[in-house]
Amino acid sequence: MPRPTLVTPELHSAGATVLHRSPFDDLVVPISQTPLDARLRDRWVKPLYMTVFEGVEAVGRVLLPQVGEISPELIAALLAQFNWRPRLVGAFLVAIKQRADFEDLVGRLLLRSDVCYAGRGYCLALASLNTRAALRFLQDYLRYYLTRPDLYFDQANALAAVRHLDGVNGTDHANEFGPLWARFVGDKDHWDLDATCARFDDALRGVVSVRAALTPP
């Protein structure tokens, strides 16, 4: 999908608040040409998009009655919307269900970063999948977007994901990004990486808890 050249009110509402060029513009991602079905929006997006990073209990209450409806078709429909809200929910469902078949799409969506606010969901999904390919997507994202101090995107969440994977896998991939991070936050006094990592780890623990609650004994 070619990048727009003007931020319209519709694009701003969808999360395309910043127009930018990147080496990832040619990555192909599916974009639906029709709005999300109202039933799916009301059943999945509205109850979840503001809570997936905030409260495990609230998420569980929404998902438990309808967990059997989480399908590849649903996730694909959510991720294909050019809007941060359904994309965030779609990425969260990838994490909950550990759908490795969506890994490549989630990675490409992260690298393109067409809409704001959804990136933390992509990072959560990739960290939950914990594969070499997932790590490469996070690394590629950081190697480029940490050189763009003008873009206040998901650099902190991506680095938090790499740190988390280091802790799980006994690796030290995050060390590569120390100098880049220091330069990136040179003009961002309010960016607190340790706090972001703590919130990210809490969110991942929440994913594990919700997954366990939704899995039949």
Image (cartoon, rainbow, N blue to C red):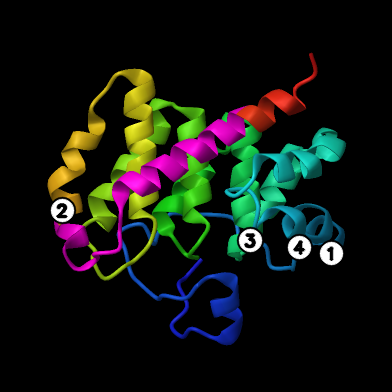
The reply to whether dot 3 and dot 4 touch (C-beta < 8 Å) is no
Q: Amino acid at mark 3?
A: Arg
Indicate which label's residue lies in the foreground, 3 or 4. Answer: 3
User: Could you tell me which residue is drawn at 75 percent across and 22 percent down?
Assistant: 215
In this rendering, position of residue 26 left or right of residue 121: left
Q: Amino acid at mark 4?
A: Leu
- From the image, tell me which residue sits under label 4: 36
- Element under label 4? loop
Q: Amino acid at mark 1?
A: Ala
- Element under label 2? helix
- Going from N to C along the chain, the mark reached first, 3 or 4, is 4
- Going from N to C along the chain, the mark reached first, 3 or 1, is 1
Across and down, in percent, residue 144 comes to 25, 54
Instruction: Please state the extent of the stretch shown in magenta in the rendering.
Output: 183-208
Q: CA distance from mark 3 to mark 4?
A: 11 Å
Indicate which label's residue lies in the foreground, 2 or 4. Answer: 2
Within 10 angstroms of label 3, few (less than 14), some, or many (20 or more) residues? many
Question: Is residue 39 in view from this perspective?
Answer: yes
Within 10 angstroms of label 4, few (less than 14), some, or many (20 or more) residues? some
Across and down, in percent, residue 136 comes to 34, 36
